[in-house]
Amino acid sequence: MFTEHDARTVLNQLATAVIQLDTALHVLEANSAAESLTATSVSKLRGLPLSRLFTHSDKFVASVRAAASSMRSFTERDLLLSRPNLETLRVDCTVSPCLTTAGGTPTLVLEVASTERQQRIQAEENKLLQNQISTALMRGLAHEVKNPLGGIRGAAQLLERELSDPQHHEYTQIIIGEADRLRKLVDRMLGPRGQLTPSSFNIHEVLEHVRHVVAIEASPEVTIHRDYDPSLPDVVADRDLLVQAFLNLVRNAVQAVKPRRGNVTIRSRAQRKFTIGSTLHRLVLRLEIIDDGPGVASDIADSIFFPMVSGRAEGSGLGLPIAQSLINRHGGLIDFSSVPGDTVFTVWLPIRNTP
C-alpha cells in the first residue's frame, strides 16, 4: 500500500521544486528541491506568504491569486523570480488546483523548474562532446606525427655517422633534439590510455600530494592555500590519473599568477543532487582551484579546453584538455569562471561512481 510517507519520499527525490499553498497563498508543505531553491528549510517555509517567498514578483503572485480564486491551472515559461538575499532565477512555473483527502480542502500545487539548470546541463553536455571530439582529433594527429618523427630521428643519426666534420654534428644534434621534443609532446597528446584502476581513497591525500609537488616547483612569491572540507567521504577513482589532472590544473594556476606575487587556493566541498551531463548524482565533490591572476583572456575563453590553446606564449596548450579528458573518464567535468583577480576552475567528480 502506497502511504503518505512513500509519497513524501518520492516528492523529495524530484529535481523540480514542489510547493503546496492554501487559497490565501501561504505555504503548507514543500519538498527538498523547494528547500534548495529557496535556501530555507521546510519548517521555516510553512506559513510563509508567497509574496515573501518570491519578492518583486507581484505580477506572478497576482496570477497565482487569480488561479486560487477560479481554481484553474496555468503555466508560465521563462519567468524571472526574485528570491530574498539570493540571485534572480529563470524558471518555468506551473500552478494546479488540488483537493486534499482531509476534508476536501482546496489547495494549490506550485511546481518550479529552473530553466537555468537545463541550460547548464546542455552546456555541460556540449563541453563533454567537445572534449570527446578534440581528444579524438588530438590522438589522430599524434599518431600521424609520431611515425615520421621516428624516421627523421633515425635519418639524422645515420647522417651524423657519415659526417666527417665534427662541427656538422651540431646540426644533426639539433634535429635529434627537436625530434625528441616533438615526440614527448606527441606522447602528452596521446595521454594515459587503457583501463582505469579504481581504488577508494581520501581526495585530500591526493590534493596534498599535488600541493606539495607544485609548491616545490613554484617561486616563493606564490602562496598556495588550502580550504578543505574534512567531512568529505572517500572517492572511488584512479588515483594516479586524478593526481595528473590536478597537477595540470594547479600548475596552470601557479603559472597564471607569476611573475608577480599571487595566491592560489585549493578548495573542496560536497554538493548534493548535482547533474553532470545527463546524469543526476546524489553527491559529488566540488573541487575549486582559485587564483588571483589576470584571468583567462576573452578571445580564448570559449576554446580554453581545446588542444594547443594557451594564454601563455610558452604554454603547450595541452594541460587543460588532458585534465578535462582524465576527469571525463571518471564521469566528472571541469568548468571555469574568470574575471581579473578571480579565476576559478571547478572540478565536479562523482564520489561513488565506479569507473
Image (spheres, rainbow, N blue to C red):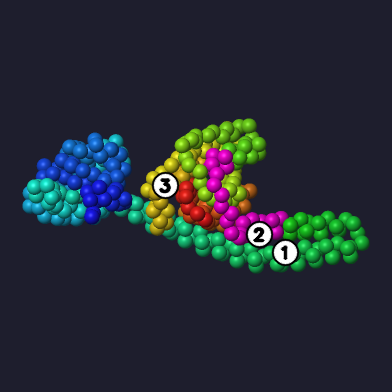
Which label lies toward us, 3 or 2? 3
Q: Amino acid at mark 1?
A: Leu
144 up-or-down from 6: above or below = below
Q: Amino acid at mark 2?
A: Val
Residue at the spot 11% in from the left edge and 55% down from the top edge: 72
Which dot marks residue 283? 3
| Residue under label 2 | 186
Instruction: Give yes or no for residue 205 being in the magenta stretch.
Output: yes
227 up-or-down from 111: above or below = above
Q: Amino acid at mark 3?
A: Leu
Give the quarter of the image for residue 49: top left
Q: Looking at the figure, which quarter contains the N terminus?
A: bottom left
| Residue under label 1 | 149
Q: Considering only order in the chain, which callout, 2 or 3, is on the residue closer to the N terminus?
A: 2
Determine whether the residue tagged by mark 3 lies in a helix, strand or loop: strand
Determine whether the residue tagged by mark 1 lies in a helix, strand or loop: helix
Q: Along the horizontal axis of the image, is 209 left or right of 101? A: right
Rate crowding at label 2 as few (under 14), some (14 to 19) or many (20 or more) other CA atoms within 10 Å: many
Q: Considering only order in the chain, which callout, 1 or 3, is on the residue closer to the N terminus?
A: 1
- Percent x, y for residue 196? 57, 56
* Residue at the far right in the pictured view: 164
Task: Give the tally of numbered discs.
Answer: 3
Give the quarter of the image for residue 173: bottom right
CB atoms at circles 1 and 2 under 8 Å apart? yes
Which contiguous range is marked in magenta?
Answer: 181-206
Q: CA distance from mark 3 to mark 1?
A: 46 Å
Residue at the spot 51% in from the left edge and 59% down from the top edge: 131
* Residue at the far front in the pictured view: 1
Q: Is residue 124 visible?
A: yes
